[in-house]
Image: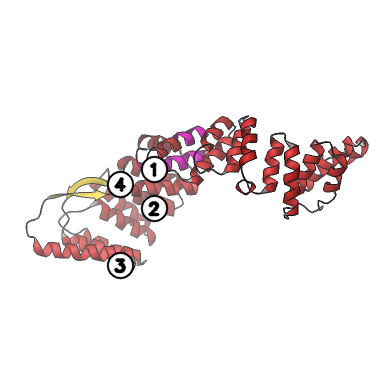
């Protein structure tokens, strides 16, 4: 039996046993929903039994049986917004749209602040192709239960799949003391393409839990693409960031001397290989150090190093050596446009400006 189903069955048995042992029943109980404590009316073991049977049916895809179980659960001494919300979703899954909407309205009336109702509304909206409505309802769920992993997880899923909204960012800023909220806020900032918001979210997240390498690197790339190299370089200094990305960010921020120093002590395999190492040396205007690295890369079969070697030899004034390398670049190579530009440059340096003009990329 799957763990989720085993847990449901275990809960059912426990509830049945509890009902057999106790006759005095409270009128109000406190439930924990998504991490948030909520007082509410006592629900009888009879209602819970049918609710859990309905959950089992829904888990195996039998929505008609689920509808019957949820409906029976609502016939107990008191109705419950969570049960009604689940029933609305089951109605929607079988295409009974009007019943789904009516039942969801009943659930909302039972508890206007129910996280479960907002989550059900979000899932129903997404199922019907209403992405904005789904996102709006997920934000409402977070507003109603800011500590809820279920609400935060739902919002994070939607942000990752379809996009973002300014309201979501405002809500997540307010509740980002929770790791799930801080992570969803970072996802939102990255989706919006806002490097400042991403940096703020990353700072908030790092105060709560260790950040993931992919999250930090995504923020670094966003800052670079967004024209904020100083921010990119700052973020790239966090532990675990790819060395090549960190150096590119520092280079974009104008830290040429620091990058050159790092290149001297960083192994090529940490930078993506000798060819990539050579390209970084070219970026800090050290063709004398780039050329031997590119030659080593070629000897190791890194054919993309031909372009790097041609650039280095041209920068060193070795026109004939550059032409020799350019001639080895296949015409069908992905570097064809760059090799044509390098060829035109080499010909111009060799005094053949007319021919260089003819072949230069337009």
x, y percentage for residue 173? 39, 35
Residue 179 or residue 9, whichever sits in front: 179
- Mark 3–mark 1 Cα distance, whole angstroms, equals 42 Å
State if disc 3 and disc 2 touch (CB < 8 Å). Answer: no
Which residue is tagged 1? 209
Which residue is tagged 2? 124
Q: Callout 1: 10 Å neighbours few (<14), some, many (20+)? A: few
Q: Quadrant of the N terminus?
A: bottom left
x, y percentage for residue 162? 49, 47
In magenta stretch: residue 125 = no
The secondary structure making up most of the magenta span is helix
Which residue is tagged 3? 65
Q: Quadrant of the C terminus?
A: top right
- Lower sequence index among marks 3 and 1: 3
Q: Nearer the viewer, mark 2 or mark 4?
A: 4
State if disc 4 and disc 2 touch (CB < 8 Å). Answer: no
- Mark 2–mark 4 Cα distance, whole angstroms, equals 14 Å
- Lower sequence index among marks 3 and 4: 3
Whether residue 304 can be seen here? no
- Lower sequence index among marks 2 and 1: 2
SS of the residue at dot 3? Answer: helix
* Rendered view: 337 above or below 228: below
Whether residue 222 can be seen here? yes
Residue 232 or residue 55, whichever sits in front: 232
Q: Which mark is residue 115?
A: 4
Q: Nearer the viewer, mark 3 or mark 1?
A: 1
Magenta segment, which residues?
Answer: 178-200
* Rendered view: 160 above or below 283: below
Total count of labels: 4
SS of the residue at dot 2? Answer: helix
In magenta stretch: residue 199 = yes
């Amino acid at each position: 039996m799957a763990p989720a189903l085993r847990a449901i069955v275990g809960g059912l048995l426990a509830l049945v046993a509890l009902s057999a042992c106790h006759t005095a029943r409270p009128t109000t109980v406190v439930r924990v929903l998504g991490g948030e404590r909520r007082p509410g009316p006592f629900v009888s073991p009879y209602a819970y039994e049918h609710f859990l049977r309905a959950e089992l049916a829904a888990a195996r895809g039998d929505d008609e049986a689920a509808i019957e179980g949820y409906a029976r659960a609502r016939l107990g001494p008191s109705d419950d917004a969570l049960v009604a919300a689940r029933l609305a979703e089951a109605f929607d899954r079988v295409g009974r749209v009007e019943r789904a909407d009516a039942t969801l309205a009943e659930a909302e009336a039972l508890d206007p602040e129910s996280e479960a109702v907002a989550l059900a509304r979000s899932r129903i909206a997404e199922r019907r192709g209403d992405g904005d409505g789904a996102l709006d309802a997920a934000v409402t769920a977070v507003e109603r239960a800011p500590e809820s992993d279920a609400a935060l997880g739902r919002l994070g899923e939607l942000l990752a799949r379809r996009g973002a909204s300014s309201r979501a960012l405002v809500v997540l800023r307010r509740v980002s003391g929770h790791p799930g909220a801080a992570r969803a806020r970072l996802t939102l900032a990255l989706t919006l393409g806002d490097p400042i918001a991403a940096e703020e979210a990353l700072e908030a997240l790092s105060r709560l839990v260790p950040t993931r390498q992919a999250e930090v690197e995504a923020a670094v790339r966003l800052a670079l693409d967004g024209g904020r190299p100083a921010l990119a370089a700052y973020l790239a200094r966090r532990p675990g960031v790819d060395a090549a990305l960190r150096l590119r960010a520092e280079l974009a921020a104008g830290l040429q001397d620091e990058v050159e120093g790092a290149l001297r002590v960083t192994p090529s395999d940490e930078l993506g290989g000798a060819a990539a190492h050579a390209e970084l040396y070219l970026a800090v205007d050290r063709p004398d150090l780039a050329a031997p690295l590119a030659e080593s890369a070629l000897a190791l079969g890194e054919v993309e190093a031909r372009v790097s070697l041609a650039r280095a030899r041209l920068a060193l004034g070795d026109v004939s050596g550059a032409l020799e390398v350019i001639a080895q670049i296949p015409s069908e190579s992905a570097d064809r446009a760059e090799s044509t530009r390098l060829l035109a440059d080499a010909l111009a340096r060799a005094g053949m400006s007319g021919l260089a003009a003819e072949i230069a990329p337009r």
